[in-house]
Amino acid sequence: MRQSRNTFGKNERLKSVIVIDRAFAQGAKLKAMSILVRYTDSSFDAPFPYQVATTVSKRRFKRAVDRNRIKRLLREAWRLEKHRLLVGWSVGDPQRALVFIYIGKEIPTFEACQNNIRKIIDVLIEKPIEKL
């Protein structure tokens, strides 16, 4: 088994506006409690199976510190749980772009975020990535 580091570097962050728009327009939805995930099959130069973006509604959380806190919690939960998706994946295999959207009304605890991310990863493991 390949040893993976629990990092979340620049190569793993989804920054392409075109891919994000495609995830919202054509991508599939997945929901776990207060987290909605839009995802689409994609290809990018990074040696990772997934690139991730996080977003929190300004309408629900007026203060930027609250939105930033939630995004930090989501990214940290993803960082600690993503290793399960790396099993069996190698460079050159299909890739996916994920957008995590927090739709809850209260600032979550880290444990709640981690449990929701685990549920999402369980579903993503069951759905294979299609070749483009």
Image (spheres, rainbow, N blue to C red):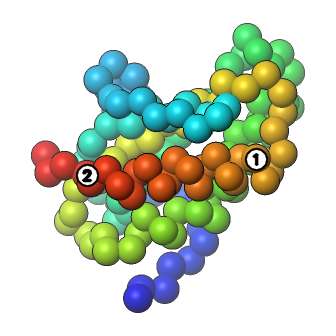
Mark 1 or 2: in front is 1
* In the foreground, 31 or 50: 31
Query: At x 46% / y 34%, what residue is drawn?
Result: 30
Q: Which residue lies furthest to the left in this view?
A: 132
Q: Is residue 47 left or right of residue 130?
A: right
Q: What element carries label 1?
A: helix
According to the picture, the residue beneath numbered tag 1 turns out to be 112
- Whether residue 71 appears in this view of the structure is yes
- Mark pair 1, 2: CA separation: 27 Å
Q: Is residue 28 left or right of residue 99?
A: left
**Residue pictured at 44% horizontal, 41% vertical:** 98
- Return the disc, 1 or 2, that comes first in the chain's sequence: 1
Which numbered tag is attached to residue 129?
Answer: 2
Among the 4 quarters of the image, the one containing residue 33? top right
Q: Type of residue at label 1? A: Ala
Image location (x, y in percent) of residue 57: 68, 19
Residue situated in front as seen by the camera: 10 or 108: 108
